[in-house]
Amino acid sequence: MNVSKRFVIAAAFLAAAGSAPALAQSRTIVETAASAGQFTTLIAAAQAAGLVPALSGPGPLTVFAPTDRAFRRLPAGTVQTLLKPENKAKLQAILSYHVVAARIEAADVPHRATLVPTLNGSNSVRAVRRNGIVHVDGARVTRADIAASNGVIHVIDRVLIPGQRRR
């Protein structure tokens, strides 16, 4: 599939997703994730990367949120290395790859693999819904559609790394 056709499909997907009704919720994505207790590494990484203000802004956003367990699946020392100030740009690139500038509910994800542009800018995630389960770059959404005032959170079982797409 050529790039322009992928862009058209992704644009149509985002337009449909952006029209989904917003659920009433008073906490932002960051506040919702922090209160869940299973995203302490993600919150710490967002703070180190300086992304908390963006994730607390008006949105709408969709965040594919790796759990603390997903971060523990990375090679030993990876998280500690990424949290160092000299690696801020790399950490920002990784975390922004988990965020889409639209509200996308699980039911909005098509059964055909679709590339969805992320806030990373130069990379898109591959999203697909199979048998009612959403997969993003091979990561499984283990809990979907957690509403926040500025978007939605989908819990995923691994950390997404730009350029390391899995099927």
Image (spheres, helix red, strand yellow):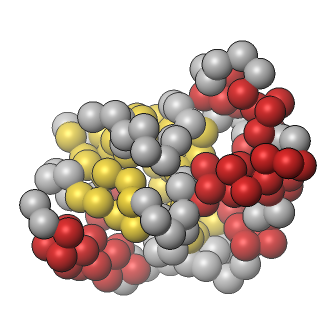
Please tell me which residue is depicted at 73% across the width and 73% down the height of the picture: 54
**In the drawing, does residue 3 fall left or right of residue 146?**
left
Q: Position of residue 85 (x, y in %)?
A: 89, 49
Q: Nearer the viewer, residue 83 or 30?
A: 83
Q: Nearer the viewer, residue 158 or 162?
A: 162
Quarter of the rendering occupied by the C terminus: top left
Q: Is residue 135 above or below residue 8?
A: above
Quarter of the rendering occupied by the N terminus: bottom left
Q: Is residue 13 visible?
A: no
Q: Position of residue 157 (x, y in %)?
A: 51, 31
Q: Position of residue 150 (x, y in %)?
A: 63, 74
Q: Is residue 53 visible?
A: yes
Please tell me which residue is depicted at 66% across the width and 29% down the height of the picture: 71
Please tell me which residue is depicted at 62% across the width and 23% down the height of the picture: 74
Q: Is residue 72 above or below residue 53?
A: above
Please tell me which residue is depicted at 64% across the width and 66% down the height of the picture: 148
**In the drawing, does residue 2 fall left or right of residue 86?**
left
Q: Position of residue 32 (x, y in %)?
A: 73, 56
Find the residue positioned furthest to the left: 1
Q: How many marks?
A: 0
Give residue 138's quadrant in the image: top left
Find the residue positioned furthest to the front: 86
Q: Is residue 93 above or below residue 9?
A: above
Q: Nearer the viewer, residue 127 or 111?
A: 127
Find the residue positioned furthest to the top: 76
